[in-house]
Amino acid sequence: MAPEGSAVRLDGKLAASELIERLRAEVARLPYVPRLTFVRVGDDPASASYVRSKERLAGRAGVASQSFELPADVSEAELLGLIARLNADDEVDGILVQLPLPPAIDPRRVLDAIDPAKDVDGLHPRNVGLLWSGRDGLVPATPLGVVELLDRYGVGTEGKEAVIVGRSELVGKPLAALLLRRNATVTLAHSRTTDLGAVTRRADILVVAAGSPRLVTPPMVKPGAAVLDVGLTRVDGRIVGDVDPAVASVAGWLTPMPGGTGPMTVVMVIVNTLTAARMRRAA
Ligand code: NAP
């Protein structure tokens, strides 16, 4: 349980639930039903549960979804064959391949095979290039959710020092591009960063996506900073974030864990499905 602190709670659960109602109204006005397709390989229970929660949320927004579940020993060629069929299917607006994939399958080859116009995870090199060149494309959901939370709570980015801990393709790098676009001064820290605390203490906006439980402690945070915890690690059956909840006594804003960035990620997948559906029809 987080100790009593002064930080404003960046309530992702509430924001996500309001956003989904807005999406529902938007979808209801469309002359078509957007369709999201999930592809899952193997029987990892965490992946199955992520897909179920995304399917539920798609249903709440009025987005149709379908799910392909392939056995863990499926060949890369079979998986690529399925992606090719979904790419060619005009009824499919978004394709989401749930990671991780079994070790025998190269995730890069699979993600690169998705039609960039249906790439709701925003990981195709074309979408990565569009993001970094400041053009419209599909952007990974977690960074979109972080930015949406900042906007909702009025945390400005212009001229601010933003530090992101973690430089993954999925979170750190695309978030850096989004914050740079919003005129923040962005630093990406990672496992080779020397004196992480000295870097994080500079941050007006600190986003932690390292997957290292309680990595960020109160002395590492600038008083009044907005701190967004992305990390999720299961420790003794509980989900633990990358930020020590005691940071609430120093930060100006803090995401709860759970109920912060996680619910926003799921909603942003639905937002991306709508974006993909609109862009494909406009093209
Ligand atoms: P990832 O690909 O494993 O990347 C982790 C990044 O953190 C790497 O850049 C790594 O540095 C850096 N890092 C690891 N330990 C560090 C440390 N002690 N100090 C500084 N940097 C460190 O992970 P990811 O896919 O970005 O996910 C990160 C975390 O977010 C995971 O816990 C994941 O479960 C969670 N996640 C949550 C959501 C959500 O919706 N809330 C969505 C996606 C992911 P190097 O590059 O040097 O190795």
Image: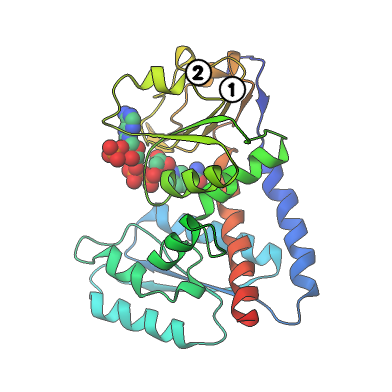
- Place of residue 26 in the rendered image (x, y in percent of width and height, measured from the top left): 77, 67
Give the amino acid type for the residue marked by disc 2 in the picture: Val
Q: Is residue 184 above or below residue 24?
A: above
Q: Which residue appears at 44% of the width and 38% of the height?
A: 232
Report how far apart the C-alphas of labels 2 and 1 lie in the structure.
Answer: 7 Å
Classify residue 212 by image quadrant. top left
Element type at mark 2: loop
Q: Quadrant of the N terminus?
A: top right
**Residue most toward the left?**
104
Secondary structure type for disc 1: loop
x, y percentage for residue 111? 36, 67
Name which quarter of the figure residue 216 lies in: top left
Q: Is mark 2 within 8 Å of ligand 1?
A: no
Residue receiving disc 2: 221
Disc 1 target residue: 225
Q: Quadrant of ligand 1?
A: top left
Foreground pick, 167 / 159: 159
- Three-letter residue code for mark 1: Ala
Residue at 47% x, 21% y: name it: 244
Q: Residues within 10 Å of mark 2 (few under 14, many from 20)?
A: many
Number of numbered discs overlaid on the protein picture:
2
Proximity of marks 2 and 1: CB atoms separated by less than 8 Å: yes
Label 1 lies in ligand 1 vicinity (Cβ under 8 Å): no
Identify the residue at horizontal 47%, vertical 18% (top origin): 201
Colour approach in the figure: rainbow
Residue 143 vertical position relative to residue 55 in the rendered view, above or below: above
Relative image position of residue 188 (x, y in whole percent): 40, 36
Q: Quadrant of the C terminus?
A: bottom right
Report the disc number at residue 209: none
Q: Residue at x 67, y 33 (%)?
A: 155
- Percent position (x, y) of residue 96? 46, 67
- Label 1: few (<14), some or many (≥20) within 10 Å? many
